[in-house]
Image (spheres, rainbow, N blue to C red):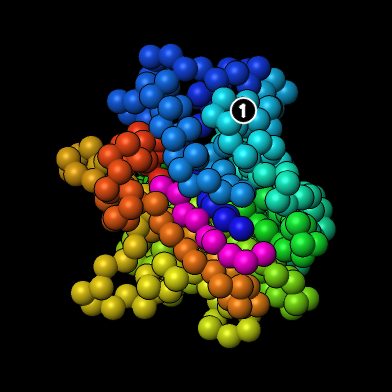
Amino acid sequence: MRIATYNVEWFNSLFDDAGQLIADDEPSGRQGVSRARQLEALGFVFTAIDADLVMVIEAPDHNGRRSTVTALARFAAAFDLRIKQAIIGFPNETQQEIALMYDPYVVTPRHDPVGDATGKKGSDADPRFDGVFRIDLDLDGTEDLVGFSKPPLELELITQRGEVVRMIGAHLKSKAPHGARGRDAVMRLAIANRRKQMAQAVWLRGRIMRHLIRGESLILLGDLNDGPGLDEYESLFGRSSVEVLIGDDDDTGLYDPHARVAVQRRPGVASPTTARFFIQHEDRYLEALLDYIMISPDLMRRNPRWRIWHPFHDPSCLQVPELRDALIDASDHYPVTLDIDL
């Protein structure tokens, strides 16, 4: 089985309210790329990776007028993709949903949220992801109330062979200090955003532990917007949220080879990257490791093989100009795939 996670930059802008594709020459959400060009690139990339299921991060919006599932089904039909069905969990208000596209002949997913629902007062006991989490992260004696702007998508998957796997798709909040003016304001907002993201990671880690203690197979995948050494505020909390999520290297730890390389931070060893952004004021590109597929210890016995479809770092992508260019036009993130015997 091939499993993928893919953050598609402003996928929502490529559909109208009826879920029809908008393939015109107007600008897409990607700078300098038209909607038709981005759609064509996405169709090429999705066809090339040929995954059995794809966790789409920043999937099209779902609200009273728009349907994520309808839009993704029409996208799949337009490019004759096997992953012709889709499922979401709790919708959000960011126009960037978390959705699973899947081949119904390979796997049967069910939205299966875990934890108790909460009111505004929240709970400190691993609540449901559309609720509120109480945590005193900065140890000042006052509990903070934390929520997900994009509640993680919790699924129960049943494979063709009848095996059951738990899957969580996540998109943790970015810690970029948008809107802040002045050095002090930027620092205060950056630290506040880092604190919120760490709280989300602690919350998510609690859910991971619940599944592992039960002996359940688990896959955590998505855009975690963080990695070891990614910014200077990490030292305030001792470690990155990715390190919180993978846990210790024991029976309750998750594994992703790219995350492990980043955590070890060996001098002279370059960390893998899954995203590429243009920094306008510096006139250069920044690359970062943001997208992961983490698996539970029992799944390590299933011959897992990871791949980042990077247009410049993956030789197979670099040597096919059409694929290389499509990966660049499609999104500022690149797909990550996991081939595993399930």
Is 181 in front, or is 312? 312
Residue 213: image x %, image y %? 74, 78
Q: Which residue is situated farthest in the bottom direction here?
A: 250
Q: Amino acid at mark 1?
A: Ala
Occupied quadrant, residue 219: bottom right
For residue 298, above or below residue 124: below
Occupied quadrant, residue 203: bottom right
Taking the magenta stretch, the answer to whether it contains residue 205 is no
Residue 291: image x %, image y %? 46, 55
Residue 23: image x %, image y %? 47, 17
Point out the stretch of residues depicted in magenta.
Answer: 334-342
User: Is any atom of residue 127 visible in this view?
Assistant: no
**Can you say which quadrant of the picture contains the C terminus?**
bottom right
For residue 120, above or below residue 166: above
User: Is any atom of residue 86 visible in this view?
Assistant: yes
For residue 84, above or below residue 129: above
In-image side of 288 versus 259 (left or right): left
Q: Residue at x 40, y 38 (%)?
A: 331
Residue at mark 1:
77
Q: Residue at x 37, y 73 (%)?
A: 261
Taking the magenta stretch, the answer to whether it contains residue 337 is yes
Q: Residue at x 28, y 78 (%)?
A: 266
Residue 225: image x %, image y %? 45, 54
